[in-house]
């Protein structure tokens, strides 16, 4: 029987009285990869921030492994949840090793030195993401695909139970998009973590995600397997474009966007 690891219960979020999320309810099962879809401004990033505890909901609540997220300290939350933002930045002068090591801050006390388990976690993350050979390189010297692998490694060094990815393939060439998404799928299988990923490309979402959550104007309008979620009417109503969906039986395999 599947175990629910993360729940949102009628979650809403407002900024200066303007609703960015309204009554979002969902349950994420342990080990699944949930894709969050929607046009720009639909609330994808806001939802990830609320679900990960970066932002507190204005209404409703988020429950992580049976505990209300707001009751967890920042340190405890960082031991359970890791976030890779859309444009992560670490400034100049940091090597790959430095960046990945930042993932261990939640496990170390003030002024405490490195423990063997910290070094093992960093080495494991470097190896899992294929960037161990870059450990001495400056983060600013890397390609976009290499940098994204390093930020994934930093998240893995936290040893999270839930990994949040906000548009992890934005601004990457197709080769690196495929490389990063394949890596996410492999890491999920190896590490056993749950992944919640905001993604704008419908074809990549269909290919890589177990379930899809579709947001429109801050509300969840569809949630479930791609076969039961994606159709031409939903794409027209949510994204404002006409499309044709190629299917293998009942399973969508490709979305083609039409010019008229």
Image (cartoon, rainbow, N blue to C red):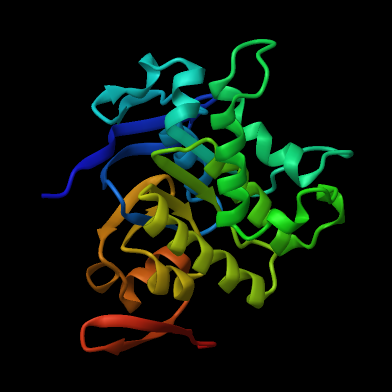
Q: In which quarter of the view is residue 11 placed?
A: top left
User: Which residue corresponds to the image point at 76% horizontal and 49% vertical from the top-left?
Assistant: 135
Q: Is residue 172 above or below residue 55?
A: below
> x, y (%) of residue 196?
41, 49
Return the residue nearer the eye: 230 or 225: 225
User: Which residue corresponds to the image point at 60% horizontal and 55% vertical from the top-left?
Assistant: 127
Horizontal side, residue 249 vs residue 99: left or right: left
Horizontal side, residue 65 vs residue 196: left or right: left
Horizontal side, residue 72 vs residue 260: left or right: left
Question: Is residue 105 visible to the viewer in this orientation of the structure?
Answer: yes
> x, y (%) of residue 18?
50, 31
User: Which residue corresponds to the image point at 52% horizontal and 28% vertical from the top-left?
Assistant: 54
Q: Is residue 156 above or below residue 203?
A: above
Question: Is residue 200 visible to the viewer in this orientation of the structure?
Answer: no
Q: How many marks?
A: 0
User: Which residue corresponds to the image point at 33% horizontal and 69% vertical from the top-left?
Assistant: 234
Q: Is residue 243 above or below residue 112?
A: below
> x, y (%) of residue 158?
53, 35
Q: In which quarter of the view is residue 94 placed?
A: top right
> x, y (%) of residue 189?
37, 59
Return the residue nearer the eye: 97 or 232: 97
């Amino acid at each position: 029987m599947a175990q629910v690891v993360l729940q949102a219960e009628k979650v809403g979020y407002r900024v200066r009285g303007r609703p960015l999320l309204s009554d979002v309810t969902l349950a994420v099962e342990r080990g699944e990869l949930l894709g969050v879809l929607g046009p720009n401004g639909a609330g994808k990033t806001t939802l990830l921030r609320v679900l990960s505890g970066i932002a507190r909901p204005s209404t409703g609540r988020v429950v992580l492994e049976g505990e209300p997220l707001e009751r967890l300290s920042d340190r405890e939350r960082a031991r359970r949840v890791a976030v890779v933002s859309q444009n992560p930045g670490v400034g100049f002068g940091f090597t790959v090793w430095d960046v990945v090591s930042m993932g261990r801050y939640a496990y170390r006390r003030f002024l405490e030195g490195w423990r063997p388990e910290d070094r093992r976690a960093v080495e494991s993350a470097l190896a899992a993401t294929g960037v161990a050979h870059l450990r001495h390189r400056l983060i600013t010297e890397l390609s976009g695909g290499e940098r994204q692998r390093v930020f994934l490694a930093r998240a893995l060094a936290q040893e999270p139970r839930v990994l949040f990815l906000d548009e992890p393939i934005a601004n990457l060439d197709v080769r690196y998009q495929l490389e990063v998404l394949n890596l996410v799928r492999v890491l999920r299988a190896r590490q056993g973590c749950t992944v919640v990923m905001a993604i704008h490309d419908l074809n990549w979402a269909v290919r890589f995600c177990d379930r899809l959550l579709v947001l429109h104007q801050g509300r969840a309008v569809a949630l479930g397997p791609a076969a039961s979620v994606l159709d031409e009417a939903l794409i027209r109503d949510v994204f404002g474009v006409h499309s044709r969906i190629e299917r293998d039986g009942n399973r969508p395999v490709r979305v083609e966007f039409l010019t008229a």
